[in-house]
Amino acid sequence: MPDGRVADAETRHWVDTILPEPMRPYARLARFERPIGWWLLLLPGWWSIALAQVAKGGGIPDIRAITLFLIGAIVMRGAGCTFNDIVDRNFDGKVERTRSRPIPSGQVSIVKAVVFLIVLCLIGLAVLLQFNQMAIWLGVASLVLVIIYPFMKRFTYWPQVFLGLAFNWSVIVGWEAVYGEISPAAIALYLGGILWTLGYDTIYAHQDKEDDILIGVKSTALKFGDATRKWLIWFYAGALVLIALGGYLAGAGVLFLLGVAGAAIHASWQLSRLDINDAENCLALFRANRDFGLIIFAGAVLDGLV
């Protein structure tokens, strides 16, 4: 876009209206004006923190951990997007929706992007160092998944699996940070989060399917085609069952299950409205998954309080 805005950014966002102009390309590189990404990274960690508190006997979730995860999600999502854009710079320039991003549009050079990436990683490390030693090492281990993910669309129609592995790793870190060890409840929650990611990112990928075919990259959107809705039913259903199982293993009760039921209603609403050939529809439903995640989190918090 002529003013430097990115095609799928939220309209009238503070990045594009209030932030000093020299800083805007870097904020766009970190996707600050597209907050849905850090919400989707953050929420599985919040589920984990809340349910780990339930497993410890209940009470208010660890506010310090909640706050640190919020900061960490915003920063590390920005770092992941910056790394992704560095790796994908040649592809992004050929796709209508992504050619306006800071690197392919020339707003940020590769050298400056690398420096910005290092700064974000250092801030993320400062956040991670506030947790126990095992949580720190688990957080560092997630970088392997972050590095692998951008390359997967070149080799497999299932890059969303690798995104799910990376985006839901916060479940493992959050559980360790609050509970002190990894339990079966955390594993069930992690697997449920991966299936959730497969669902919402398949919806997201349908925006780019024509361009992806032209440039030769792969996605579950291309893999499933017109059968996408059937696959999404299984992904969301499996996610909800595993998330409910995680809550059961953590000792959660009826209020958490009501939260899962509310999320199931939300997922059904998404699937009823989905039009895989309408890019705006796909983007709107992708963003709606923030509410899906918040419903589950609210159920976990209320269950812990009771």
Image (tube, rainbow, N blue to C red):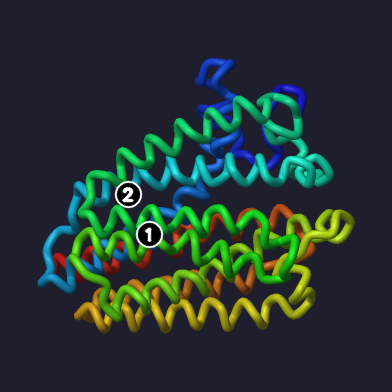
Please indicate whether residue 50 sits to the left or right of residue 13 in the image: left
Report which residue position mark 2 lands on: 69
For residue 254, side relative to residue 47 (left or right): left
Residue 235 sits above or below residue 59 on the image: below
Q: Is residue 123 above or below residue 87?
A: above
> Which quadrant, please, contains the N terminus?
top right
**Considering the numbered disc 2 on the image, is that residue within a helix, a strand or a loop?**
helix
Q: Quadrant of residue 86?
A: top right
Q: In the rendered structure, which amino acid carries the disc numbered 2?
A: Phe
Q: Name the residue located 56 percent from the left edge and 53 percent from the top edge.
A: 147
Q: Is residue 145 above or below residue 52?
A: above
Q: Is residue 70 left or right of residue 134?
A: right
Q: CA distance from mark 1 to mark 2?
A: 8 Å
Residue 142: quadrant of the picture: bottom left
Question: Is the residue marked by circle 1 packed among few (<14), some (14-19), or many (20+) residues within 10 Å?
Answer: many
Q: Position of residue 164 (x, y in %)?
A: 52, 66
* Callout 2 crowding tier (Cα within 10 Å): few <14, some 14–19, many ≥20: many
**Which amino acid lies under the numbered mark 1 shown in the image of this protein?**
Ser
Looking at this view, is 86 or 99 the one in front?
Answer: 86
Q: Residue at x 65, y 42 (%)?
A: 85
**Residue with the mark numbered 1:** 170
Disc 1 to disc 2: CB gap under 8 Å: yes
The disc, 1 or 2, on the residue closer to the chain's N-terminal end is 2
Q: Residue 197 in the image: state x and y as whole percent.
A: 54, 66
Query: How many marks overall?
Result: 2
Q: Which mark is residue 261?
A: none
Helix, strand or loop at label 1? It is helix
Note whether 237 is above or below 285 in the view shown. Answer: below
Which of the two residues, 262 or 155, is positioned nearer the viewer here?
A: 155
Q: Position of residue 256 (x, y in %)?
A: 28, 74
Name the residue at 60% across, 58% down.
Answer: 149
